[in-house]
Image (tube, coloured by chain):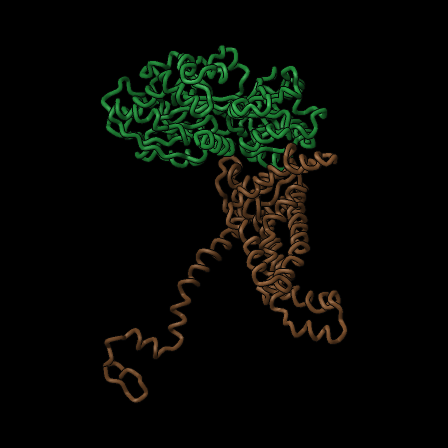
Amino acid sequence: MKEHDTERVRWMRLATTAAAALIVVTACGSTSTAGVTTQQPPTATMKPQATIGNGEGALNLIAWEGYVDPSWKDQFQKDTGCIVNAKYAGSSDEMVTLMADGGGGQWDMVSASGDADLRLIYGGDVKPMNPDLIPDFKNFQTYFQTPPYNTINGIHYGISLQWGPNTLLYNKAKFTTAPTSWSVLYDPQYKGLVTVPNNPIQIADAALYLSKKNPSLKITDPYELTQAQFDATVALLKQQRPLVKKYWDLASDEISLFENGDAMVGAAWPYQTNTLQADGKVQVADTIPSEGATGWGDTWMLATKAPHPNCAYLWTKYVSTPHVQAQQAISFGETPVNTKACAEMESLQAGSCAQYHADAPGSYFQTIKFWKTPIATCPDGSQKCVPYAQWVTAWTSITA
Amino acid sequence: MTVDTLGRPRGKSGGAFPLQALLWRVPWLRPALLLVPPLAWFVLIYLASLVLLLITAFWTIDTFTTQIVQVWNLDNFRVILTDPAYRLIIGRTVVLAALVTLTDAVIAFPFAYYMARVATRRVQTILFAAVLLPLWASYLARVYAWILILNHSGVLNWSLQSIGLPPANIGYTNVAMWVVFSYIWLPFMIIPCYAALERVPDSLLEAAADLGARRWRAVRDVVLPLALPGVAAGSIFTFSLTLGDYITPILVGGAGSSFIGNVVYTNVGIANNVPFAAALAMIPVAIMAVYLLAAKRLGAFEAL
């Protein structure tokens, strides 16, 4: 049941995180030349609270399904007296809509993904948070203390929660040694055995591969592509198309493709690897190839008009503790940002820490390019980059 | 109440049942009152949403904010008609819908003929149950069952190999979609065919026999023309259901299996480009309009 839920949620998130697409940083519409990262969000000057007062007795959360599970929510309610009301959102888009007008005085926090974050921040819907009030913050992986999707100009617009990479999954019977490059997904040798997600953000995976394979294209960020870089990436994906057995929509699709021998190699999430290894029908493993990988990261963000800020800080403090981080990671199939969660994960499920890369060294995060929404504004401030709407159109013609 | 010789309540003094009196005096009022709620429902809920769809199709979105921009233009339709990717997808959807319809007609007609004209009452009941039984199970469960049959290590390949034949490997291809669609919509073809065949009067067949027609001749010249409206009626179901589906392509389709519905879904769910999705959704509406006109000429509506 749990696994089923998780899988469904993951799928919805993929589809909708793709809604990253939409990420329209409304606020920067007016400043056409200023890069997104250099512009100050509307709430940048709001000073976060310096102490956590007494709980207000209630906490209203917008979350991904499974992020406010009774197995850790109940204890929080008992400890703090904050009664948690959670609304599960089906997509990043829905989260942004619900959080409009600073949460409207109704919502306190949202567990937003990297693709929605900038939109919330530049929309003025979330306000800076004070990491000093979160004791476990100092135990976070360095990258997740200040990831670019929730920290702008040194101001924290939320506290990182969990993350996951998009990995290369392969059948060990076909690949006796682990593939070291994403090139296997583009190799005619594996015609009809390849599977990749049916998601426009997949273009970024191809761009990441091209950034190493073809340095003359000068791709530095797979989410910020000029027209020429974009066209080269789309051309590569069109060459890949005849090799693909199926563009999968559901995590369960990819699992059955591998179990039935219809696919031998593909792009996946750790969830699929774990499920396939647990089932044991086929021998599979996953890897992060030398070019690196894409990934996602979630953040608890505080609504600008949050009616229960103390309960919100108490909650953030609570979900950052190693035990709850480990519980959520194993329940959902993702990786905690708190490095101290490793031991807790081991006690809950032996081997899970290494399995989810929760013990990865800091250098590991240099290899992961976290999802963010492609927008027209390039890093140099020009408007020459290809926005997400075009990614969607291109994806339709690639997979047609 | 006092009543005159005609049984008519006495005008204004009979105020005890004013509504009945009114309905009696104004004969068209009763049917009007009965029809207004369903008609209002039809117009407001059904037609209004279609009209809204049509209007939205002529708008566009701001690619930066994905907000709908209410400027009238034909860009969406231009893209659909000029981009080869969309032509390919529309063509694939229509061809597969036609193939499925043809397949179902070929399978359903003899089956329905046996049910309607040959089988005993008892066998008829059993066959009816057999045709309708799959409809009780979830659509998704039935599609997944086919995945188990068609995939690489599925029942089909296993059976072929155990009798020494090479594996078919049709899982996750357009062939798989054709098979699954034909299975899923078969009952919708059998029932109208059965209804049409059952209505063919025995006397006509007897007359044909009297005039020297053998069995096959009678089927070809008497039964088939009379049952054709039933086949046309069934084809409306099989064709339109295939045309609008997007779940089977997701589940059993392969790398090049997108249907119109899948592109609509992507544009609404991921790209937030509702105007483009609306424009694309008008394509099946237009195709079905043409199809229904053709079916009407074949008498499909009399057979329903």
| Residue A183 x/y as whole percent | 66, 21
| Residue B161 x/y as whole percent | 71, 34
Q: Residue furthest bottom?
A: B5
| Residue A359 x/y as whole percent | 47, 12
Residue at left 48%, top 25%?
A36
Depth check, front residue: B118 or A385: B118
Image: A313 above or below B36: above
Residue at left 52%, top 41%?
B268
Depth check, front residue: B156 or B244: B156
Depth check, front residue: A286 or A388: A286
Image: B216 above or below B176: below
Q: Which chain is brown?
A: B
Which quarter shows the N terminus of chain A?
A: top left
Chain A colour is green
Which quarter shows the C terminus of chain A?
A: top right
| Residue B291 x/y as whole percent | 63, 58
Residue at left 47%, top 24%?
A333
Depth check, front residue: B108 or A135: B108
Task: State the image quarter where residue A303 is shown.
Answer: top left
B117 relative position to B45: left or right:
right
A197 relative position to A89: left or right:
right
State whether residue A242 appears in this view. Answer: yes
State whether residue A224 appears in this view. Answer: no
